Amino acid sequence: MNTIELKPGIYSVGIVDWNSRSFHGYAINNGTTYNAYLIIDEKITLIDTVKASFSEELIERISEIVDPKSIDYVISNHVEMDHSGSIPAVMKLAKNAVIVTSSPGGKKGLIAHYGDAYQYMEVKTGDTLKLGKRTLTFVTTPMLHWTDNMVTYCPEEKLLFSNDAFGQHYTSNNRFDDEEELERIMYELRHYYANILMPYGQQAKKALAAVKALDIDMIAPSHGIIWRSHIKEAIEAYEYYAEGRTEDYALVIYDTMWHSTEAIARSILEGFSRRGTRAKLLDLGKTPLSDVMTEMLKAKYLAVGCPTLDSYITPNIGAFLTYMKCLSPKNKLGFAFGSYGWSGQSIGIVEQMLKDMGVEIILDPIRITYVPSEKQLKDIEDRVSEIKIM
Ligand SMILES: [Fe+2]
Ligand SMILES: [Fe+2]
């Protein structure tokens, strides 16, 4: 990635992690970037760093513009190590730099990770820092998605450094939204929101209100593409997700051992089709959980199918329900289904786990012994097509 000037004197100095396919455990299909930004002013300022394993590359990129020793401020918008991991490498060179971070979460978190040998400046919402001809203003965004998160705004440049917010796990040799296919980056924006920010809709709403009060012509997140031509679309998408809005869209999510639960899933899909609901079949044996959760963001209906394995659920369904519980999607209607040999505990377990996650059950569980007959499959299709929602 060539070093790119976002605005005169403001550079992108982060790195592209082309081949990463897992972000702390969930699948990312297109790699990611760790974006960091350098502001050249009377005070030389670095906004965020990158994952520790890319420290050398970050230092090289900074060195193409200034001597890293001359950095005065390191703004740490977020303690998570994909953004703070290279702070030790930077501070080793920039010995007199002050780390600017949120109070109290940022300082506490950074000390827990890197010790208390550095100089810290703690900031709260509304605090400002004069760099010379430019100013930085800070807005804390707690639990979006850690306690320490904040965003940094430069009013003179109408530029928001939004850290994880508005990020995408997406790689390209381009840096700006208008250099990429909009549909593609909007999907990656949704994928990121679903897998990182979904549990925090209420906090996202508050942060969006603060962001909308700012005069912005560029949003520079810490992952993926920088927004300059489609800021409105990105903010509107976040508003939609934060409100927990859903569409007339059904996901039929299942695991299968000998294709019986799969056959039921296909009948359920047909039932949704007959009632005019857009629907998608998702086999957990073949679909990454991060893609399932991305679909779930807009889905109103969930049908979750699991065969009984011994006396419990299958590992794929167990992993899915655990991940779903972490991300706690809102406003879902659903039901459980599955095939079994003799005891059939899995279907009741899945139903109970859905209920525990706040899913409103709209159909009695569908339980089939061994292999569903044609008549049973037709009956399932009819029952699903006749679901009435009050
Ligand atoms: Fe993060
Ligand atoms: Fe991040």
Image (cartoon, helix red, strand yellow):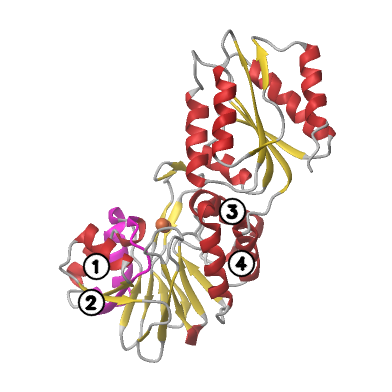
Q: Tell me where residue 385 appears, x and y as whole percent.
A: 82, 31
Is the C terminus in the top left, top right, bottom left or bottom right quadrant? top right
Quarter of the image where one finds residue 260: top right
Q: Quadrant of ligand 1?
A: bottom left
Residue 67's label in the rendered image is none
Closer to the observer: label 4 or label 2? Answer: 4
Point out the stretch of residues depicted in magenta. 52-81
The numbered mark, 1 or 4, whose residue comes first in the sequence reads: 1
Closer to the observer: label 1 or label 4? Answer: 4
Considering depth in this image, is 375 or 193 the residue closer to the camera? Answer: 375
The image shows residue 312, relative to residue 226, as above or below, that is above
Report which residue position mark 3 lands on: 190
The numbered mark, 3 or 4, whose residue comes first in the sequence reads: 3
The image shows residue 79, relative to residue 9, as above or below, that is above
Considering depth in this image, is 271 or 365 the residue closer to the camera? Answer: 365
Secondary structure of the residue carrying tag 3 is helix
Q: How many angstroms separate mark 2 from mark 3 (CA)?
A: 36 Å
| Cβ atoms under marks 2 and 1 closer than 8 Å | yes
Report which residue position mark 1 lands on: 90
Q: Is residue 198 left or right of residue 4?
A: right
The verdict on label 3 being within 8 Å of ligand 2 is no
The numbered mark, 4 or 2, whose residue comes first in the sequence reads: 2
Report which residue position mark 4 lands on: 235
Q: Tell me if I can see residue 115 in this picture.
A: yes
Residue pictured at 52% horizontal, 42% vertical: 290
Report which residue position mark 2 lands on: 97
Q: What residue type is disc 4 on?
A: Ile
The crowding category of the residue bearing disc 2, from other C-alpha atoms within 10 Å (few below 14, some 14 to 19, many at least 20), is: many
Q: Tell me where residue 65 appears, x and y as whole percent.
A: 33, 76
